[in-house]
Image (cartoon, rainbow, N blue to C red):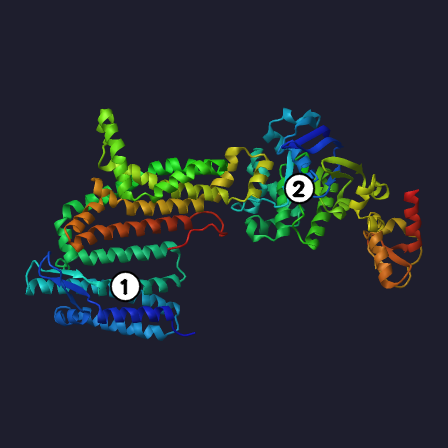
Amino acid sequence: MIRFENIGKSYDGHRVIDGLNLHVARGEFVVLIGASGSGKSTVLKMINRLEPHDCGRILFDGREIYDFEPRALRLRMGYAIQSVGLFPHWTVARNIAAVPHLLGWSPSKISERVDELLRLFDLDPELYRTRYPHQLSGGQQQRVGVARALAGDPDVLLMDEPFGALDPVTRAALQSELKRIHQLSGKTIVMVTHDIDEALQLATRIVVIDRGTVLQVATPLELLTQPANSFVADFLGRSDMGIKLLSLRRASDLVRSQAAKPGESLPSNASVREAISAMALHQVASINVLDAAGVHLGVLHASDVFTALGAVHA
Amino acid sequence: MRGNPVFAVLLAMGLGAASWLPLLNVAPNRLVSGQGVSLWEVVDAVVDSSKWLNGFGVVAVTLLCIAVWMTPSRRVRYGVVALAWGLVLGLVALTGAYAAHVAQLQSPIARTSWGSGFWVLVLCLCLMAMDALHRLPLGLAVRSGVWISLLCAVLGVMTGTGCEQLAIMKEYANHAESFLPAILRHLQIVALALLPSLCLGLPLGWLLNRHASLQRWLMPPLNIIQTIPSIALFGLLMVPLAWLAANWPGLAELGISGIGVAPAVVALTLYSLLPVVRGTQAGLAQVPSAVLDAAQGMGMNTWQIFWWAQAPLALPVVLAGVRTATIQTVGLAAVAALIGAGGLGAIMFDGLFGNAQDVVLLGVLPILGLALLVNLGFAVLAECLPAPAEGGRLDPV
């Protein structure tokens, strides 16, 4: 879908991106991660030509992006940013309708699309269509921002730290919504963040960038188990990499089929990390896990967790 | 809390002014300075001819004194507005009656003009009404309507029978033929100056916002122009314009010459350029950059970004700049009379050079009225903007 070939860029003779190669396949959720100033945002903005590159080429859908007219290119790519940037003098509905309007959709189709997106983000169209951005909470504003980015049914969704300014609770809610929408729509998403937990939770592949070069491209599991070098390991948080690994696995995948024991039960979507935490809290070595319907599925044993991790490493 | 301290202070000031300042100045003719006449003397003199007026005055003042101690409910506030404005109209009528009395008793060429007591009283009453009006749940358009109707009522009382002997109305009669043309000429000068100022200032402001480096080149000359006294600027423009007219007869036929409307319009345009340019630039600069980033990333072109985001979001601040420019031009246009541009300034300078205060007033009061109307008009316009109630609003009246 998107292919970077030997991309380079300099500001005032200072190299900010150097020899970048990357291929984002259709339907992937790629997260670019790095410290501030690593060049990750610049890489993202190169895709929709908000930032020009000096050398190399970027292919979108098999064609050089410079063969596209910049507006035509951007209309095929949704774009969501940390500061949201909703038009303050437009209602929520009109904000979301911006790109469909630019694409020349019919009013009835636009209206349907707006309602569909509002419902997708758990905002009641009756209530929220006519509101103005300043009448929304930060989380709602960002939901509308992402809805606006998705409105024109773009091939690619580009997101520049979309949840960076939100409180942890809202951020977690929006992250799981985004994950759900990605699985539902199969859209290709490229997102920039500096939050490693966000990256591990959302990405199908993570690109670690430092000083304009790619250090590693890997799935979350590979990244945690085989960090390419000590910088990547440090960036992942060397001391709690094991804990992060636990959060990638579901408790339900490791249960033994046996009768329920007295005590707590975990829901089916709980991660192994949550399970270990619950065991530590209740001072037990095993815990019940329920299935999606809320019926007892089996029992997770702490010892199984660590042998399973060993299997990954081996 | 009961009562209203602002109101009490204003009422006390008004009563003080009525007691110790001369309500009217009476002079035997236009050339000598007059003698002060207090409110009590005025009331005493016309007690027979205007019984109902005196009666209303006593009742209204008593009610206002009571209102000071009352909890300011909505009904009390409406009452205060009505009483204060009734008193303003009553004062005008009373002074008119006294002027008629003086003309009859002394001589027809005696001059009865408003004194300091009159002005302070009217000011206190208007402030009282304004205070009460602002605390009432009325829209700006309604409030403006109320003010304009008061203005019309005062004009009605002054031009109606009974006030002909007031000095200002005598002067009005003397200048009757030139008064309306002077107002029209004044408005014409303002319009002719503002049109090029907007045509130049709005694009310049846009340019400044786009290329910040231009600020270094453009702002100093505009700032310097503002510091040149208007008279000096008129003088400076006379030479080149006279030269132009002398060398290109076509221009002279168009009305360009060293004196008259042409240099006035050029100078006023230059003065009004700064507020327009600065307002436009500031308005565009305060458009959130996130909105522009998002708009660009969405695939909008430059024109779409301008019309859909920049223009509507900048409009309130731009409008504030244009409001400043317009009010400033209404005032400065008076000075243009000195180089033969005409307008209300011509009447004002007539009075100034002839040492006739009432003629000065005849020129100044309409300028004041025009400035107030312009201010009201812009405030109403700003209120009508479709932007949501989030910052960037002009102050109400």
What x and y, as percent, mark residue B141?
37, 54
**Residue marked by disc 2:** A160
Q: Quadrant of the C terminus of chain A?
A: top right
Residue at (36, 68) in percent of width and height: B6
Q: Nearer the viewer, mark 1 or mark 2?
A: 2
- Residue A172: numbered disc: none
Residue at (37, 38) in percent of width and height: B198
Badge 2 density bin: few <14, some 14–19, many ≥20, Cα 10 Å:
many
What x and y, as percent, mark residue B51?
16, 71
On the question of residue B156 being in view, the answer is yes
Q: Quadrant of the N terminus of chain A?
A: top right
Q: Are marks 1 and 2 in contact (CB under 8 Å)?
A: no
Q: Is residue B125 above or below residue B190?
A: below
Whether residue B371 sits left or right of residue A99 in the image: it is left
Q: Secondary structure at mark 2?
A: strand
Q: Which sits in the foreground, B164 or A218?
A: A218
Q: Secondary structure at mark 1?
A: helix
On the question of residue B162 being in view, the answer is no
Disc 2 sits on a residue from what chain?
A
Q: Amino acid at mark 1?
A: Trp
User: On the image, which quarter does residue B322 sit in?
Assistant: top left
Whether residue A277 sits left or right of residue A123 in the image: it is right
What x and y, as percent, mark residue B361?
20, 54
Disc 1 sits on a residue from what chain?
B
**Residue marked by disc 1:** B85
Q: Amino acid at mark 2?
A: Asp
- Inter-mark Cα distance, 1 to 2: 61 Å
